[in-house]
Amino acid sequence: MISKLKKIKSLPKRMVIHGEPIVGGFAVGRVFYYQDILTREIEKKKLTKKQVEEELERLQRAIDKVHRDLEKLKSKVANEIDTEHAEIFGAHQLILKDEELLKDIKNGLKNKRLNVEQIVQEVFGKWEKKIKGQDISAIPERANDVIDVGRRLLRALVGSVNQHSVLDRSKDSVIFAHRLLPSDTASFNIKNVKAIVTVEGTQNSHSAILAKALDIPFVSKINVPIDSLSRGARVIVDGDKGLIIVNPTQAELESYPLLIQKRLSKRLKVLKRIENINLKTNGELIKVSANVSSLSDIKMAIDCGADDIGLYRTEPLYMNSQNFPAEENLYLQLVAALNCVGDQEVNLRLLDIGGDKTLPFLDIVEIKDAALGLNGIRLLLKYPSLLEIQLRVFLRLSAKFNVKVSVPMVTLPKDMIEVRRYFSQEKDKLRKEKIPFNEGLFLGAMIETPAALMSIDELLEHSDFLSIGTNDLVQYIMAAGREKIEVSEYYKAGNLLVVNALKDVIRKTKEAGKECSICGELAGNLKFTKSFLDIGLRNFSVHSSMIPYIKYKIIRLTDNRAELLSVKDK
């Protein structure tokens, strides 16, 4: 009897932890503690003058390694998610080159004569405090980005075992961490990581954005110490409610997998019911297209019922190369990707880099505020050989595929006039070489700046179509970065302002007999679908995973409702 009582007492105690829901969904798994190397105690060693020089060499080797690792991670994210998320790691490469930061490390080495690991840990800790201590205009995510780079550098110096390799062997892991940085989230094996739980974290953090793109449930700001749970304890994570159930009951263990399956079945059910419905309103066809960056993205878009490819980001073709990709290489890569689209229309966007979006082989001068600098078409016009090769490749593709070309970051009509001049020049060259292309290939402007909105009449004269990029447009109109938590309310308010501002653009485009589409996060926000339809928008381009839900929402709002049995909104 006594032994029985002892056994009962030793059973793990059920506990419910409350937090803030960051990314929805459900998961069942076991606790995996993710340690931060920057907080670990590192042995302190005194150095001789000669050893200081050796440590400086070790530092440079570690910096070079981290730079290469970031380049690989940037390419991985560009291929598996998209180039916008990959930009995070381009910014990390810039931090690694920061002259003031490197000066602090080198001076610390020379003055204190301590091993470089000690100095790196100290300097990055000081920089984190300095950034977090700035006034309200500072960017909290900037502190996390700096720490992310510092942690990578320290790991390269210490030569510690990468926890991601441990995770590769640990199935059904629920990550528990004080904070999770972008490189952590992007490097996870998503087959093994079921959910993320942190003490620090926000909806707009880079890790949250990546977790959302990877569809990993995420709960933050939990109300218990992070180390209060037993390693390997079974947990249920409810990303919809922001709950973590530790040592759940048998009934709970049986119910949550059903919720996971129900969520998956719901998506498949929606796909099945909408696959043969042509969306229309007032006799006008409505298209829901996909934003893609690779062949795998295109396959996912097809699986999710995309009507077209509304935005093809070409940056990965460059980010995965150590040199300027040659014309034939670009052409063959795009042919391989487009071979599976059939007769669907594909909107190829010209290379959109600059500012904090860099290429390893292109020497772009850094500027204080990358968003206001040499990016998009501004950079391509500065480096015309880049533009010429792309236009030539796109023209060649037009002989085989139903493509059109969009110009990123158009600000003034003269941008489109200049691009058209190069466009005509490349057409002339192809004619002389007797290389086939579609003479009527469309060239359109991306509306991403307030200046473009204000000159829409003249832009329409030089554009065959318009594509509205809401991510940049909102932040430029509101002077509020979309990842800056201090001004998140301004960015949010900008969504409604942009919807109202676009009414005139859509009307004028229709009057000109041209097509206007919208891409970016706002296009995939179900709260604004009705508003966009009301102002006359008929072309949406969204992340593939959102296509079924956007289509179903449109069906419920339009003449097609009778064709569909009732399915609850997402």
Image: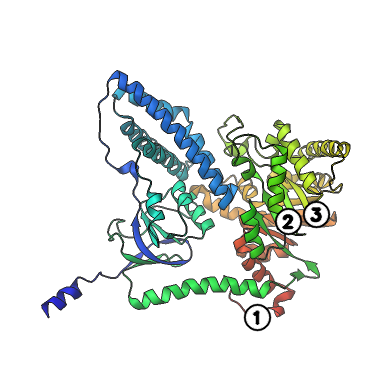
Pick the residue in front: 499 or 383: 383
Pick the residue in front: 143 or 82: 82
Pick the residue in front: 517 or 388: 388
- The mark that comes first in sequence, 2 or 3, is 3
The x and y percentages for residue 166 are 37, 52
The residue identified by callout 1 is 565
- Report the Cα–Cα distance between label 2 and label 3: 10 Å
The residue identified by callout 3 is 509
**Location of residue 519 by image quarter:** bottom right
- Of marks 3 and 1, the one in the foreground: 1
- The mark that comes first in sequence, 3 or 1, is 3
Which amino acid is tagged 3?
Thr
The x and y percentages for residue 19 are 39, 62
Q: Residue at x 57, y 34 (%)?
A: 360
Q: Which labelled disc corresponds to residue 517?
A: 2
Quarter of the image for the N terminus: give it. Answer: bottom left
Pick the residue in front: 201 or 196: 196
- The mark that comes first in sequence, 1 or 2, is 2
Q: Would you call the spot at circle 1 few (<14 residues within 10 Å), some (14-19), or many (20 or more)?
A: few
Q: Residue at x 45, y 37 (%)?
A: 66
**Which structural element holds mark 3?**
helix
Which amino acid is tagged 2?
Ser
- Report the Cα–Cα distance between label 3 and label 1: 35 Å
Q: Would you call the spot at circle 2 few (<14 residues within 10 Å), some (14-19), or many (20 or more)?
A: many
Task: Judge left or right: residue 377 versus residue 475.
Answer: right
The x and y percentages for residue 64 are 46, 32
The x and y percentages for residue 181 are 43, 48
Q: Quick check: marks 1 and 2 in contact, CB under 8 Å?
A: no
**421 lies above or below 305:** above
